[in-house]
Image (cartoon, rainbow, N blue to C red):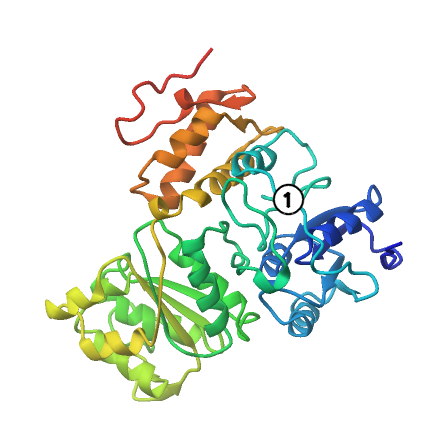
Amino acid sequence: MTTFPMLPPHRSDHVLVASPNSLVRQRVLESLRPRAHVEQTAGGAEALGHLEEGVWQVLFLDRRLPDLDAEELSQTVRQRYPTVEVVWLDNETTPAPDLVEPRGALLDAARESAGNDGDQDDYGSSSDRESSTGNDCAGDGAQFRAPDELGCAPLPGMIGLSAVMQPVYRMVQLVASRDTTVLITGPTGSGKELVARALHQLSPRAARTFGVVNCAAIPETLLEAELFGYSRGAFTGALQSYAGRIQAAHLGTLFLDEIGDMPLSLQPKLLRFLEQKELQRLGSSQVVRVDARVVSASNADLLTLVRERKFREDLYYRLSAFPVAIPPLRERPDDVVQLAAYFVKRLTICPPAPILSEEAVALLVSHSWPGNVRELQNVIERALILAANQTVIRPAHLMLSDASLRSCAPER
């Protein structure tokens, strides 16, 4: 008979279980209910995402994770979340890895994710069902696979298990431990900043600053001062010195969004910093050494900008040492349902959350999503408003941007 470790004394409020084996997760859940609120993940990266979002007392950790080294994860948890107690699910308490169970169709998973269970707290998990996890293959009739065949679990803060996202997850997990510069490309609204944040969270710099600079949102005349800082009196209005965003990210990560919009005049200075790890504030001759990892993103084709002489070729190759391309949502139909269910639940003001009808799901999957994940979130938020207090979201509640839906008035 399989047994599980007892909960540590006085640590029974919120418990997180990380194991690639769905039977292990279910049995731990059943053994602790109703004493504790239990959430489940199949991978280490997803567990880190949960720890980042909530308050947990105990982490039950399987030594055989599909994405991260369990020992390293344990050390990371102890350093970053000292109040979380790690309890190992060892060989004696973990069933054999070939014990697998069937997964329902994707639509069934969507209904569960956005269902009427009042105990649900986060997408893909609740107190009495299995979560959407790294060993789930999105798709109708998909089956659980043994740990040696598992795909990568979603990155922290991300949702979706489609095949086209697997290379993204794998590449980010591989490069996270290094200081290599990473260039994230993809259309607007596809989640480039989420990938950058996940990369930071999985890196040794996770406990340090994650700085964000949108190069398109800051006027050209101010961008240099914002990035590199300035000394007191450097220009009219500089009443005190300012360290700048780059120096503020020392020992952490600096995310340069929309890097293609950086002025040509400023690009040589950024290139020098990337090569020398040194900078000078405006109005100062002092050289400051800064250890900041740079991750950049662009929805524009930088190579085209290089050919048009709008972007420096040497800076492009320095930034793109490790490129990561995020596919548009139209290439990820399996993820649309999971993301929609997540947004339904997250944006519902008064639980229980409504469910998506089969017709609504079919319409969402068939849509081209020119605005990507951001557009999907807006569509779901409008649908919740139009559905009012109804328990089912129907096609009439979905205001899509194309002609596939003629009526957007709520059904009575």
What percent of the width, then of the height, locates residue 371? 31, 43
Q: Tag 1: residue type?
A: Pro
Seen from the viewer's position, the closer of residues 402 and 271 is 402
What percent of the width, then of the height, locates residue 366? 35, 34
Q: Which residue of the protein is positioned furthest toward the top in this rendering?
A: 412
CA neighbours of label 1 inside 10 A, class few (<14), some (14 to 19), many (20+): few
Q: Secondary structure at mark 1?
A: loop
Q: Is residue 241 visible?
A: no
Q: Which residue of the protein is positioned furthest toward the left in this rendering?
A: 308
What percent of the width, then of the height, locates residue 195? 44, 60
Q: Quadrant of residue 120?
A: top right
Q: Residue at x 29, y 42 (%)?
A: 370
Side of 325 where 43 appears, left or right: right
Q: Residue at x 33, y 81 (%)?
A: 274
Seen from the viewer's position, the closer of residues 384 and 135 is 135
Side of 241 where 108 appears, left or right: right
Seen from the viewer's position, the closer of residues 285 and 53 is 53
Side of 363 where 28 appears, left or right: right
Q: Which residue is mark 1?
A: 102
What percent of the width, then of the height, locates residue 40? 68, 51
Q: Residue at x 84, y 45 (%)?
A: 35
Q: Is residue 144 visible?
A: yes
Q: Residue at x 64, y 58 (%)?
A: 51
Q: Is residue 325 above or below residue 372?
A: below
Looking at the rendering, in which quadrant would you find the N terminus? Answer: bottom right
Side of 388 where 113 appears, left or right: right
Q: Quadrant of residue 336?
A: top left
